[in-house]
Image: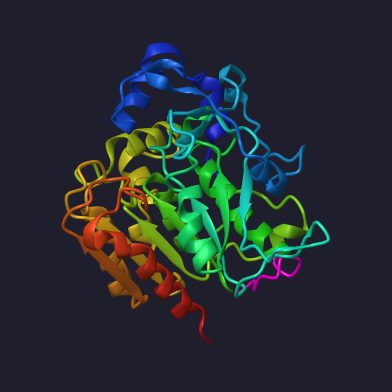
Amino acid sequence: MTGGASRSQRRPWRHGRIRAVALALALCLPPVAAGAQGWAPGAETAQERASRIALWPARSAAAGAGAGTAGVPAQRIVERSADPRVPDRFIEHVRDPYLAVYAPACGSDGGRQRPPCGHGTALLVIPGGGYVRVVLDKEGTALVPDFVDTAGITLFVLRYRLPGDGHLEGADAPLADAQRALRIIRERAAALGLDPQRVGVMGFSAGGHVAARLATARTAAYAPVDGIDRRSARPDFALLVYPVISMAPDVAHAGSRREILDASAGNGDVRARERRYSPDLHVGPDTPPLFVLHAQDDDAVPVANSLAIHAAALRAEVPASLHVFPRGGHGFGTRAAHGALAAWPRLAIDWIQEQARP
């Protein structure tokens, strides 16, 4: 674990305009409050509420605790879209992380939902948001038609804690949540009709950084809290979509790097922390197979991030599939992927099916 608690005691959570400007720089958006530019309070759907799986026992050390959380605003969901047909929600200041589950439907039996169908494959989905928020739709619900309805994969979309919100684990809070989430999926696999040896992770942007750390971590980011933590936290395969990878200043996404390094202050010098939080430097023979996707013209997270982890995989002889498209920018997800890039979900699904074969 990091020394996040002592940092929180030394440096209270950053309020006001300074934090708003940092958030804006991370997401390339003006610093506005909910309600501005058509933003409004948002909410989860009834299905999302019904499927929710909490990550941590209420009294565990990693259940959103930390001396620095006292001044953090309440957890909330914001809706940025004025079109209910195309939701664009995000959640921020997550204190009680959880999973929302999207499973292939098997119809109903006397009004009672049957267990999920499909071929037993599960994906832990970790959306992006510059480490200052977690998007819920363009890298969450927008995946459902391709990955759930068509491919029969069960998605577990993670609402994770953020580094700058003063949690006990500091910069490792997102990784702790991801490790716990993967273990919970494996613990519940039999009840959900899933194969515990076919559980992968797919991360986008800053969520790709979390996913890459999950795939390369050799130790847990938290102390065990119950029997679930006897399960493996290593994904069976990992998909990294326009991922943040390196913390080197000439390659890193500036906003993500700032959030990570600020939250890990006190845990070594800057260069040591850059190395610790650059997952390309931790790829090894035990790293699972990788699928890496990026657009060459991404002006937010340079394509050099994906090239770095692919090169590391080649050096470690880790199976890795790299897809770089000339155009697409950043944050295209499935909604804004056009031309040849629009085929990426099919490429990803075919690759996942290859990993699932004996």
Residue visible at 70% across and 70% down? 193
**Looking at this view, is 222 or 155 the one in front?**
155
Q: Is residue 69 above or below residue 17?
A: below
Q: Is residue 252 magenta?
A: no
Range of residues picked out in magenta: 189-197
Position in image of residue 341 (x %, y %): 26, 60
Position in image of residue 70 (x %, y %): 62, 19
Q: Is residue 163 above or below residue 111?
A: above
Q: Is residue 193 magenta?
A: yes
**Looking at this view, is 34 or 145 the one in front?**
145
Specify whether 47 is left or right of 58.
left
Residue 266 at least partly seen:
no
Name the residue furthest right: 110
Position in image of residue 190 (x %, y %): 74, 70
Residue 136 at least partly seen:
yes
Specify whether 152 is left or right of 31.
right
Name the residue furthest front: 110
Residue visible at 49% across and 63% down? 147
Quarter of the figure that contains the N terminus: top right
Name the residue furthest bottom: 358
Position in image of residue 264 (x %, y %): 44, 36
Q: Quadrant of residue 188?
A: bottom right
Specify whether 88 is left or right of 219.
left
Q: Quadrant of residue 65?
A: top right
Dominant secondary-structure state across the stretch colored magenta:
loop
Residue visible at 28% across and 73% down? 315
Residue visible at 23% across and 63% down? 340
